[in-house]
Image: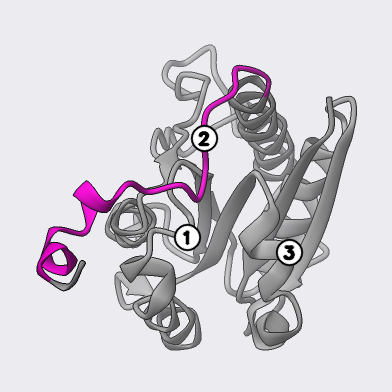
């Protein structure tokens, strides 16, 4: 059974998030029957129908000052019309990723912003499937999920390195694994017949008086 996935992202500065987005998409494409589209947030107006129709959306942006980037926040706020009101993305699968220069960098707060935005739309959030890496003296920076993120992919890129050098390969492999996992969950829900974009009137009680 086919499954469709969109990776919507904002990347600036050195293009670190764009590399993560490509890795998420590459992982998603390893799932049999998957169709994946990379969508830079600046071009989202060309892809609304695909976003409405797809089975999963993975959101990504840099962590700026402990939150989502302003350009990505603009995209999130554009969802507050009919997509939110009419539950157009109800039961669509969601996931997310972010990157900051700091190892901490308040990435968790940025991920929470993405989770809240997705759940406001009625989406089903998929967490990281693996435990954190580099937890002991036997671990290393080469471990998957070296930043120990559980809401999604939390990557780190040194500010004095180019996007060809950072995020490191372990973060990109983590993003690939996550992209595959989100897509597998979406495929399973699709195969199981989970209904999307079909909100009953009961989820819009403020409209009952109008009917």
64 and 128: which one is in front? 128
* Label 3: which secondary element: helix
Residue with the mark numbered 2: 195
Q: Which mark is residue 88?
A: 1
Residue with the mark numbered 3: 50
Is residue 91 toward the left or the right of residue 55 in the image?
left
153 and 93: which one is in front? 93
Q: Report if residue 201 lies within the magenta region.
A: yes
| Residue drawn at (49%, 87%) of the image | 71
* Label 2: which secondary element: loop
Look at the picture and state if 35 lies above or below 87: above
63 and 186: which one is in front? 186
Circle nearer the viewer, 2 or 3: 2
| Residue drawn at (76%, 45%) of the image | 4
| Residue drawn at (29%, 58%) of the image | 120
* Label 1: which secondary element: loop
Bounds of the magenta segment? 191-209
Circle nearer the viewer, 3 or 1: 1
Q: Are marks 1 and 2 in contact (CB under 8 Å)?
A: no
Mark closest to the chain's N terminus, 3 or 1: 3
Residue 154: tell me if it is visible.
no
Look at the picture and state if 60 lies above or below 45: above
Mark closest to the chain's N terminus, 1 or 2: 1
Question: Hey, which quadrant is residue 59 in on the image?
Answer: bottom right
Q: Horizontal and vertical percent for residue 167?
A: 67, 55
Which quadrant holds the C terminus? bottom left
**How far is the residue under mark 2 from the one under mark 3?**
17 Å
Q: Horizontal and vertical percent for residue 74?
A: 43, 87
């Amino acid at each position: 059974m086919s499954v469709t996935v969109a990776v919507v992202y904002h990347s600036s500065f050195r293009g670190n998030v764009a590399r993560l987005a490509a890795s998420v998409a590459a992982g998603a494409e390893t799932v049999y029957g998957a169709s994946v589209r990379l969508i830079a947030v600046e071009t989202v107006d060309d892809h609304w129908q695909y976003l409405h129709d797809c089975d999963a959306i993975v959101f990504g942006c840099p962590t700026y000052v402990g939150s989502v980037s302003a350009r990505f926040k603009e995209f999130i706020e554009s969802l507050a019309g009919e997509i939110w009101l009419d539950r157009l993305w109800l039961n669509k699968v969601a996931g997310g990723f972010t990157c900051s220069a700091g190892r901490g960098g308040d990435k968790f707060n940025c991920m929470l912003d993405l989770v809240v935005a997705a759940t406001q739309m009625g989406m089903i959030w998929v967490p990281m499937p693996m435990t954190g890496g580099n937890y002991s003296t036997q671990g290393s920076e080469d471990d998957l999920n070296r930043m120990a993120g559980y809401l999604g992919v939390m990557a780190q890129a040194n500010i004095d390195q180019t996007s060809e050098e950072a995020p490191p390969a372990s973060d990109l492999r983590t993003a690939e694994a996550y992209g595959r996992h989100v897509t597998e969950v979406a495929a399973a829900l699709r195969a199981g017949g989970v209904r999307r974009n079909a909100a009953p009137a009961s989820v819009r009680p403020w409209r009952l008086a109008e009917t």
